[in-house]
Image (spheres, grey):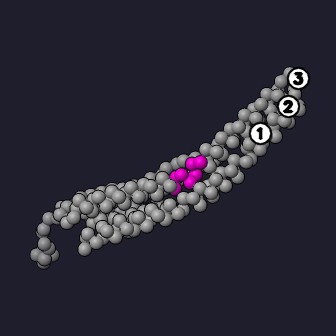
């Protein structure tokens, strides 16, 4: 037991700590990129330790989007710390822009689908009022029910089409962001070595 303590160098190393919450699909990118800014995964924390679930509604489907908390540490005495911090902020803004681009894929489609669905519901409400009138107006009920049903069926197809179109627009922008991330990480890596 005494031999174990004799060989240990009791030198103190100060660390900066950082905890980030990212979507599961970007966690590997962050784990691979943060070492380029002098960060290493904190061995005192579990890998991808805590998980958080964010629930959101998307055209009648409830999905969960899993996020992970990543814990990092960096030596306080690292050289070029100011420049590495600046590059890291640039990297963090690129990650935020990637997340915003991903969210924007579905935003327009969701708004359009909900709008069409609400118009369909308004026509259907008019149809119900027409049938419950005294005396019932059957021809008006049928006339209002047709666009009501169409307004309930069409949103699914509108949503899919708009997401497909927006995805085609956004994919080149995402590739540009990934290229920018690679350039930032390369600069950070050169500063470390």
* Front tag of 3 and 2: 2
- Asked whether the residues under the numbered discs 2 and 1 touch, taking CB atoms below 8 Å apart as contact, a structural biologist would say no
Q: Is residue 67 visible?
A: no
Which of the 4 image quarters holds residue 44? bottom left
Look at mark 3 in the image and give the residue it sits on: 135
Residue 52: x, y in percent? 44, 53
Q: Position of residue 81 (x, y in %)?
A: 22, 62
Compared with residue 48, is residue 112 higher up or lower down, i.e. above or below? above
Q: What's the CA distance linking mark 2 and mark 1? A: 12 Å
Q: Is residue 92 magenta?
A: no
Residue under circle 2?
140
Cα–Cα gap, marks 1 and 3? 22 Å
Q: Residues within 10 Å of mark 3 (few under 14, many from 20)?
A: few
Residue drawn 57% across the image and 59% down it:
169
- Of marks 3 and 2, which one's residue comes earlier in the chain? 3
Helix, strand, or loop for circle 3?
Answer: loop
**Residue 20 occupies which quadrant of the picture?**
bottom left
The span picked out in magenta is 102-108
Which residue is disc 1 drawn over?
148
Distance Cα–Cα, label 3 vs label 2: 12 Å
User: In the structure shown, which secondary structural element does the residue marked by tag 2 occupy?
Assistant: helix
Please state, as top left, top right, bottom left or bottom right, where the C terminus lies in the image: bottom left
Q: Overall secondary structure of the magenta stretch? A: helix
Name the residue rendered at 54%, 59% in the picture: 170
* Quadrant of the rendered image containing residue 171: bottom right
- Label 1: element kind: helix
Q: Is residue 157 left or right of residue 53?
A: right
């Amino acid at each position: 037991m005494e031999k174990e303590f004799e060989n240990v160098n009791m030198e103190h190393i100060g660390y900066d700590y950082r905890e980030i919450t990212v979507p599961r699909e970007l966690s590997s990118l962050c784990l691979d990129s943060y070492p380029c800014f002098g960060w290493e995964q904190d061995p005192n924390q579990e890998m991808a330790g805590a998980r958080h679930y964010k629930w959101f509604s998307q055209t009648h489907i409830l999905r969960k989007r899993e996020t992970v908390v990543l814990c990092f540490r960096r030596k306080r005495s690292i050289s070029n710390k100011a420049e590495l911090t600046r590059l890291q902020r640039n990297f963090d803004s690129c990650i935020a822009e990637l997340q915003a681009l991903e969210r924007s894929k579905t935003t327009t489609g969701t708004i359009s689908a909900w709008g069409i669905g609400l118009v369909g519901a308004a026509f259907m409400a008019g149809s119900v009022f027409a049938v419950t009138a005294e005396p019932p107006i059957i021809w008006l009920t049928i006339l209002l029910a047709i666009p009501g049903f169409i307004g309930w069926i069409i949103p699914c197809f509108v949503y899919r089409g708009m997401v497909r179109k927006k995805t085609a627009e956004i994919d080149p922008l995402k590739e540009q962001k990934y290229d920018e991330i690679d350039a930032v990480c390369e600069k950070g890596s050169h500063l470390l070595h």
